[in-house]
Amino acid sequence: MKIRIFLTAALVAIALFLAACGDPKVVVVVATPTPAPVPAATATAQTQPTSTPEPQPTSTLELIPTLKPDRSYTSLSSYSRTPEGSCSQDFSSAKQIDAIQYLELLGDGLEDVRNRDTYFYESSSGGLARNGPTATWIFEMGIEVAIKWAPESFLSVRHPYRDHDVAWQDYVDYHASLCDAYEGRGTLRPVVIHLDKLLWGETGNGWPGHALLWKPFEYIDTGPNVVEAPSPEGLEHYTKYISGAGVIIVGGADVPDEAFLAAREAIIFMTSARPEFREILKAQQTRISLFASGDTSVLPEYSTENEPGGFAMGMTDASMTAAAEWLCYPGNWDRGGNPVIHELVHTINHIVFEELNEIYFYERIYVLAQNAIDTGLLAPFEQHLEPGEEQDNSHLVGEYWAMAVEGYIMDRSGFKDSHDTRDWIQENDPLLYDLITRYFPTEPWTYCPGVEDHLDQ
């Protein structure tokens, strides 16, 4: 068996590996890409802090027997990049079929994956919070097809039910990325991106922030120094650059250096318990795009989007976004939520958990979220939604994990409306605390030193 198969803890059959948040500006954890231009990321919920609510009497949390807390390091799926095998050997038995038929097989398989609701949450009003190792499932579907079928050679064919031409090179690029992932040389992100190009064309699914439309930044180890950005063509807006823990952070000239340093410090701390997360984030070309004021429309990739706080990065997105003015740092003593921390939690779901097929997380998180709502642990919050969209329990469920981890990392009383400190979470939502500490550090950390002297300002 190939190394990729060993990485997927739940791979019983190839047809059944990889987060995902999220989620368009509606609050979901993993979005389902469609032809509509929506990001695969959730919107940051920026709340005005109030006193942490007193929890209602806790009802019995009905968890299935397998949902037992496990914070052991070795229980996470293995992550390796040891190459093994070759495409010519691994897929040598594939039968050649008509190119149109091959594209239809992939399209139908992708549709099935996108609608796989194993870990979805549906509210009583029909709202959906999507979740699950979608990229793993797409990979597994692609492998199943590749083992059985290959298209007959062609120069260019018209997609059977989408208005674009498919070139032979599009297939070659997709198949090469699939081989690299299967044989341990690559990650799942290129597989999902190239599949989008094969099935949707040059612009992917129509989302302006799709990774197909923007060249990635080179990763440069800057240490704690803001440097001139090596911006690719079209991304000259970004003039500042810093990196840390496998993540690139960029912003325009109007973003203060202090915001870059604060964002980097938070990322380094958040990933300190799981250094393998840093390897995956770097391999997936994870980037944070900071904006100084206004909303995401000031960024070149998101000129049509008006998210005020930011949104997460999914497998096919060019970057994650965050409002620098919502961060806390000297000279900007912000008392409230932190969009870098919040959206990075979602991004780790999409970029890391989907890569690792982290079923342990997906089996638990929405059960815990529903319990927090039912017992009054999760306080109401404001969030940016699309015009005409109303908040329901699917939004609360979709944001529960990121909001709670955000409060756990900041550990500042009153900075969040609920789940604002580690002690509060451990006492009132202990199974969630167990899940958080499976992935995030337990060591003490002082968020935004000095802010305590400015809380009344």
Image (cartoon, helix red, strand yellow):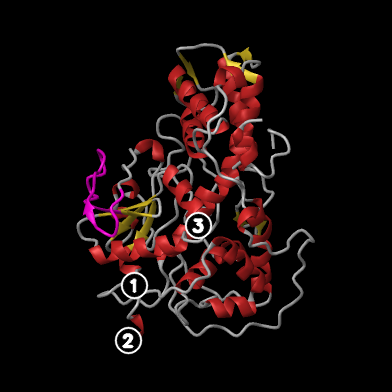
Q: Specify the quadrant that holds the C terminus.
A: bottom left
Residue on which disc 1 sits: 328
Distance Cα–Cα, label 1 vs label 2: 13 Å
Magenta segment: 221-242
Q: Specify the quadrant that holds the N terminus.
A: top right
**Residue at the bottom extreme of this rendering:** 456
Task: Say above or below: 23 vs 315.
Answer: below
Count neighbours of disc 1 (C-alpha within 10 A) and say few if under 14, some if 14 to 19, many if 20 or more.
many
Closer to the camera in the image, 446 or 47: 446
Q: Position of residue 251 (x, y in %)?
A: 27, 55
CB atoms at circles 1 and 2 under 8 Å apart?
Answer: no
**Residue in the image at 41% along x and 75% along y:** 446
**Residue 43 in view in this figure:** no
Count neighbours of disc 2 (C-alpha within 10 A) and say few if under 14, some if 14 to 19, many if 20 or more.
few
Q: First in sequence, mark 1 or 2: give its number.
A: 1
**Residue in the image at 67% along x and 45% along y:** 9
Q: First in sequence, mark 1 or 3: give its number.
A: 1
For residue 340, the mark is none
**Residue in the image at 63% along x and 79% along y:** 428
Label 3 element class: helix
Residue on which disc 3 sits: 346
